[in-house]
C-alpha cells in the first residue's frame, strides 16, 4: 500500500497523479487550474456562472470596458484647449452596454478554451465540502451540476475561490431598474439622467467618474471627509477636486439611511433627514464573501465573523489540503492578487518552491479619471512614524508631456527609505496611472535604489519622466 502523504507533499514519480478540485472559476480559480495542469495534476474546475467568474462576466472586465468608453468622452470634452472641437457627440447607452456584455462573454469563452486546452475538466455547477471526520488527506466534495444529478468526488487538494457578491442594504432594496447594484448597470437601455451613488470607495468613485463623463448628473454620497477615504489623502483630494470641477455633487460626511423608488425615479434619504432625488441610485457599500454554501463549518474550515476564509501567505486554511484564494479570503479585492494567491496555493500544495505573497509589494489602481495608483509604503505610514522614509511629490503641471495632452491634473509621489535609499513605494494620479505605477512597483519588488531609478534614461517628453525626476530629487549625494 502506498504510504500516506500530506496534501502539501509532491506526488512521487510513478505514484498516483494528484487530484485537484477548484471551486470557483475566477482569476484565482482558472490561473490555479492552469498551474495545476502544467504540474501534471488531474484538475477539475467547478464554476457556476461561466469561466472567468464574476470578475470577467459582471465585475472587473465589464466595469473597465464601460470606463474605457467614458474615458473617450473625457478626451473629447476636454480637447477644446488643444484647438480641437467635436460637434454632436452621441452616446448610445444600449450599444455601449451591449459591447460591454459581448466583450465579457468573449473573454469568458477565451478563458474556457485555454483552460480546456490545458487538460482541465470544467464542471458548470456548484461544489461543497462533505464531512470527512478523519480527512486522511483525501477530501470529498459534493458536486451539483447545473444540468444533471449531483455526485460525490474525491480529491487530494481543494482550492476554494468563490469570490464575493455586492452587499445590499435592507433599507435600499435593489430592483434592477431604479435601485441598482453595480452588476445591474449594464441592463439599462438608457443612461441615468441623474445617478445617485451611495458609497465613495473605489467602486463608487469609479462609476461616479464614468457616468459623469458619459453625461449623467451625478451625486456621490460619502460618509467620510473625502472620496476614497482609504487611499492616499493627497491623491484622493486631487481626484475629488477634479470631480467637482467637472460638475459632480459630492456630499461628504453624509450617510444614506434609505433609498426608495418614486413615480419618476428614486429618493435617497440621508441620516440627517436630507433627501436627494435622482433618476437612479447605485448602491456601492462593499461585498459579502460567497462562503455560506461551501460546507465550511461542518468540515472544520475556519470562517471569520464576516464570512471570509482566513489564509496564510501560501493560501492555506486551517484544514490540511484545503486552500482558499481571491475575494472570499478578505485579502485585497484585486484580480491580480486573486490570481497570484491561486498560483501560490497550487505551487505549495504540489510541493513546488514558492515565494509567499507579499502584500506590501502589490500595486493597486482606481480607474477613475484621473486614475489613482499606489504601491508599497503609504503616506499614512510615514506620517505615523511606521516608515522612516523621505518623500517627494511632483505635480504633473510641471511635466511637458502632460501639458501637451492637456492632462495636468495629478502628480507623482515617491518614497525612499532614509537608511538605504531603496524605493519604498509610490503614488501616481494621472490619466493612465495604471501604466505609470509599474516602474515604481518594479523598483519596490526588486529593491532598486532611487539612484538606480534616477539613472534610468526615460523618453522625452513622457509622463514617466516625472518618476525619474522624483528619484533624482530623492538622491542624497
Image (cartoon, helix red, strand yellow):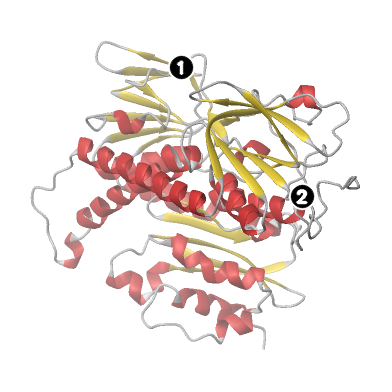
Q: Quadrant of residue 295?
A: top right
Q: How many marks?
A: 2
Task: List the residue tagged with mark 1.
Answer: 172
Question: Is residue 245 found left or right of 239 in the rendered image?
Answer: left
In the displayed orientation, state which residue is furthest to the left: 87
Sort mark 2 into few (<14), some (14-19) or many (20+) by Cα contacts within 10 Å. Answer: few
Could you say which is closer to the camera, residue 16 or residue 233?
16
At mark 2, the secondary structure is: loop
In the displayed orientation, state which residue is furthest to the front: 1
Question: Please, is residue 54 above or below residue 169 in the view?
Answer: below
Could you say which is closer to the camera, residue 350 or residue 92?
350
Question: Is residue 128 found left or right of 314 in the rendered image?
Answer: left
**Which badge, 2 or 1, comes first in the chain's sequence?**
2
Task: List the residue tagged with mark 2.
Answer: 16
Quadrant including the C terminus: bottom right
Q: Residue at x 65, y 61 (%)?
A: 361
State which mark lies toward you, 2 or 1: 2
Q: Quadrant of residue 186?
A: top left
At mark 1, the secondary structure is: loop
Picture disc at residue 203: none
Quadrant including the N terminus: top right
Amino acid at each position: 500500500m502506498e504510504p500516506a502523504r500530506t496534501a502539501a507533499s509532491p506526488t512521487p514519480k510513478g505514484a498516483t497523479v494528484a487530484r485537484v478540485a477548484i471551486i470557483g472559476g475566477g482569476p484565482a480559480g482558472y490561473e490555479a487550474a492552469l498551474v495545476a495542469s502544467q504540474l501534471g495534476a488531474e484538475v477539475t474546475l467547478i464554476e457556476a456562472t461561466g469561466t472567468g467568474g464574476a470578475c470577467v462576466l459582471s465585475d472587473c472586465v465589464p466595469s473597465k470596458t464601460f470606463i474605457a468608453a467614458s474615458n473617450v468622452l473625457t478626451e473629447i470634452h476636454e480637447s477644446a484647449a488643444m484647438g480641437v472641437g467635436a460637434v454632436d457627440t452621441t452616446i448610445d447607452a444600449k450599444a455601449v452596454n451591449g459591447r460591454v456584455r459581448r466583450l465579457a462573454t468573449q473573454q469568458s469563452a477565451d478563458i474556457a478554451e485555454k483552460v480546456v486546452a490545458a487538460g482541465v475538466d470544467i464542471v458548470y455547477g456548484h461544489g461543497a465540502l462533505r464531512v470527512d471526520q478523519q480527512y486522511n488527506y483525501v477530501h470529498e466534495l459534493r458536486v451539483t451540476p447545473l444540468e444533471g444529478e449531483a455526485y460525490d468526488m474525491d480529491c487530494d487538494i481543494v482550492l476554494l475561490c468563490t469570490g464575493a457578491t455586492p452587499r445590499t442594504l435592507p433599507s435600499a432594496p435593489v430592483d434592477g431598474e431604479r435601485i441598482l447594484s453595480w452588476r445591474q448597470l449594464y441592463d439599462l437601455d438608457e443612461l441615468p439622467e441623474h445617478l445617485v451613488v451611495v458609497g465613495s470607495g473605489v467602486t463608487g468613485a469609479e462609476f461616479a467618474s464614468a457616468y459623469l463623463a458619459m453625461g449623467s448628473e451625478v451625486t456621490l454620497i460619502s460618509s467620510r471627509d473625502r472620496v476614497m477615504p482609504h487611499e492616499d489623502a493627497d491623491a484622493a483630494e486631487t481626484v475629488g477636486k477634479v470631480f467637482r470641477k467637472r460638475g459632480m455633487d459630492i456630499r461628504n460626511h453624509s450617510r444614506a439611511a434609505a433609498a426608495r423608488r418614486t413615480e419618476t425615479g428614486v429618493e435617497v434619504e440621508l441620516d440627517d433627514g436630507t433627501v436627494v432625488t435622482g433618476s437612479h441610485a447605485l448602491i456601492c457599500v462593499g461585498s459579502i464573501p460567497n462562503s455560506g454554501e461551501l460546507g465550511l463549518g461542518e468540515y472544520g474550515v475556519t470562517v471569520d465573523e464576516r464570512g471570509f476564509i482566513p489564509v496564510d501567505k501560501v493560501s492555506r486554511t486551517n484544514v490540511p489540503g484545503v486552500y482558499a484564494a481571491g475575494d472570499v479570503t478578505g485579502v485585497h479585492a484585486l484580480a491580480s492578487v486573486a490570481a497570484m494567491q491561486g498560483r501560490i496555493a497550487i505551487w505549495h500544495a504540489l510541493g513546488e518552491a514558492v515565494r509567499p505573497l507579499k502584500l506590501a509589494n502589490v500595486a493597486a489602481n482606481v480607474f477613475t479619471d484621473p486614475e489613482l495608483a499606489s504601491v508599497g509604503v503609504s503616506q499614512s505610514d510615514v506620517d505615523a512614524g511606521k516608515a522612516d522614509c523621505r518623500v517627494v511629490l511632483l505635480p504633473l503641471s510641471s511635466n511637458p508631456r502632460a501639458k501637451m495632452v492637456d492632462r495636468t491634473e495629478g502628480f507623482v509621489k515617491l518614497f525612499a527609505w532614509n537608511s538605504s535609499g531603496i524605493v519604498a513605494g509610490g503614488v501616481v494620479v494621472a490619466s493612465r496611472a495604471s501604466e505609470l505605477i509599474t516602474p515604481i512597483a518594479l523598483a519596490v519588488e526588486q529593491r532598486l535604489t532611487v539612484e538606480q531609478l534616477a539613472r534610468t534614461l526615460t523618453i522625452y517628453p513622457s509622463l514617466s519622466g516625472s518618476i525619474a525626476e522624483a528619484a533624482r530629487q530623492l538622491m542624497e549625494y
